[in-house]
Image: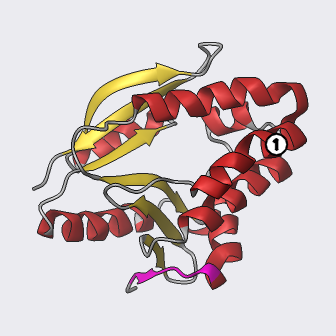
Amino acid sequence: MEPRIATPADLSGLTSTIAGAFAEDPLWTWAFPDDDKREVWWRFLLQSILRYPCTWVAGDFEAVSVWIPPGGSELSDEDEERVGPLLEELLGPRAQPVLDLLDRFSESHPKDVPHYYLSLLGTNTAHRGQGLGMRLLLANLEAIDAEGMPAYLESSNPANCPRYERIGFERIGTFTTPDGAHEVAMMWRGPH
């Protein structure tokens, strides 16, 4: 199936795939224990990222890869201002630890070398285990390699790190949730 670039009209399909893909993720279920509130977060994040033509869809949302181009940011300045109030609305007193976690993502992100940033990669739950997400990722990396650019990601689930390592990503560091309960691997892949 030929991947295509997502548009704002794809927001609901993207949100559904990402919400399902991360429904059991150790880090994101820590941040948002309630599935519905986690889905609101994904929708908010994705609608902001869609300002770039760097989100890819395979098939009928069977797999999704969400990239930030070199020099870009996940959230627009306007949406960045909305994060605190949104998290307070969704999480109440748990908002501050999640804000602290988001700060750790930001502080850990490499800033010295322009790169593509894989914000999210997910496969529709009905299509897991078929290699669709990794095939989509490899197609993306082929295009990134053609530009001579590196790529960066954070793996919120330790079980996924070996998959990324097999395709050339290397761990360059880690950070944890504010309570130290969950670790995030920072991974870098130079141009191939």
Q: Quadrant of residue 99?
A: top right
Report the quarter where the N terminus lies: bottom left
Residue 155: image location, x then y, percent? 44, 39
Residue 23: image location, x then y, percent? 69, 48
Give the image's coloring scheme: secondary structure
Q: Which residue is mark 1?
A: 85
Residue 12: image location, x then y, percent? 71, 74
Residue 18: image location, x then y, percent? 62, 60
Provide the secondary structure element on which disc 1 rests. Answer: helix
- In the figure, is residue 48 to the left or right of 110? right
- In the figure, is residue 118 to the left or right of 59? left
- In the figure, is residue 115 to the left or right of 75? left
Image height of 131 relative to 39, above or below? below
Image height of 142 relative to 95, above or below? below
Is any atom of residue 180 visible in this view? yes
Q: Quadrant of residue 11?
A: bottom right
Q: Is residue 139 magenta?
A: no
Q: What are the residue bounds of the magenta stretch?
A: 3-8
Report the quarter where the C terminus lies: bottom left
Of residues 117 and 187, the one drawn nearer to the viewer in this rendering: 117
Three-letter residue code for mark 1: Pro
Image height of 154 relative to 78, above or below? above
Q: Who's the residue at 86% across and 43% down the image?
A: 90
Q: Who's the residue at 25% across and 63% down the image?
A: 141
Is any atom of residue 17 visible in this view? no
Of residues 51 and 164, the one drawn nearer to the viewer in this rendering: 51
